Amino acid sequence: MNNFQKIAIPVSIGILGVMIINSCTVGIPKGAVAVTHFDAEKYLGRWYEIARFDYKFEKDMDNVTATYSQNPDGSIRVDNKGYNYVKKEWKESIGEARFVKDKTQASLKVSFFKPFWAGYNVIDIDEDYQYALVAGNSLKYLWILSRTKEIPESIRQRFLQKAKRIGYNTDDLIWVQHN
């Protein structure tokens, strides 16, 4: 083995390791706090995506829903569906969510491609579990969800103001169309 290989192989493995660790970040943005006294049972069911940032994995998608259900092992099944209006086809992605700490704190990790996990943090929710503001592990990820295809202006403004205080650029949100 030449000197280049003796250096390149360990460095490459180290870089790959750092990339894997970074892709498994399940934190929460600075200034955001996950909802406490969270009731996972009330959160289960179908949610309509009202707004999001332009993520590669949701590009050109409308009519986006997320349906959460309990798995036998206590984890949560995540069933995301949406219509790609450019390709004119429905897309579906099935994943799994697990609580980071306990079920009364709305800090979860979600995976659609194991062993890679990402943060999923409910940072605001109304008392009837009809509207939710969800943060990822950084200021790149934010969702506004509703049990219906629309959201009241008062809730919209509440969520936007909270997101801005945390540091999100809410001007970049995409408002999802539902037919």
Image (cartoon, helix red, strand yellow):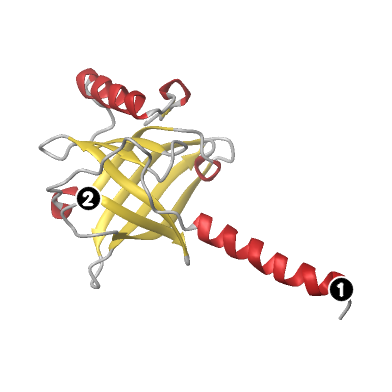
Q: Which residue sits at x=59%, y=58%?
A: 19
Label 1 element class: helix
Whether residue 100 is visible:
yes
Q: Where residue 40 is drawn, which disc sits there?
A: none
Residue 110 x, y percent position in the rendering = 38, 56
Quadrant in the picture for residue 148: top left
Density class for disc 2 (Cα within 10 Å; few <14, some 14-19, many ≥20) is: few
Q: Nearer the viewer, residue 97 or 179?
A: 97
**Quadrant of the drawing holding the N terminus:** bottom right
- Residue type, label 2: Gly
Label 2 element class: strand
Q: Nearer the viewer, residue 26 or 113?
A: 26
The residues bearing labels 2 and 1 have C-alpha atoms spaced at a distance of 57 Å
Please name the residue that numbered disc 2 is placed on: 45
Sequence order check, earlier mark of 2 and 1: 1
Q: Which residue sits at x=29%, y=59%?
A: 100
User: Above or below — where is 93 with respect to 130?
Assistant: below
Residue 132 x, y percent position in the rendering = 25, 37
Q: Nearer the viewer, residue 131 or 37?
A: 37
User: Above or below — where is 54 with respect to 153?
Assistant: below
Density class for disc 1 (Cα within 10 Å; few <14, some 14-19, many ≥20) is: few
- Residue type, label 1: Asn
Residue situated furthest right in the rendering: 2
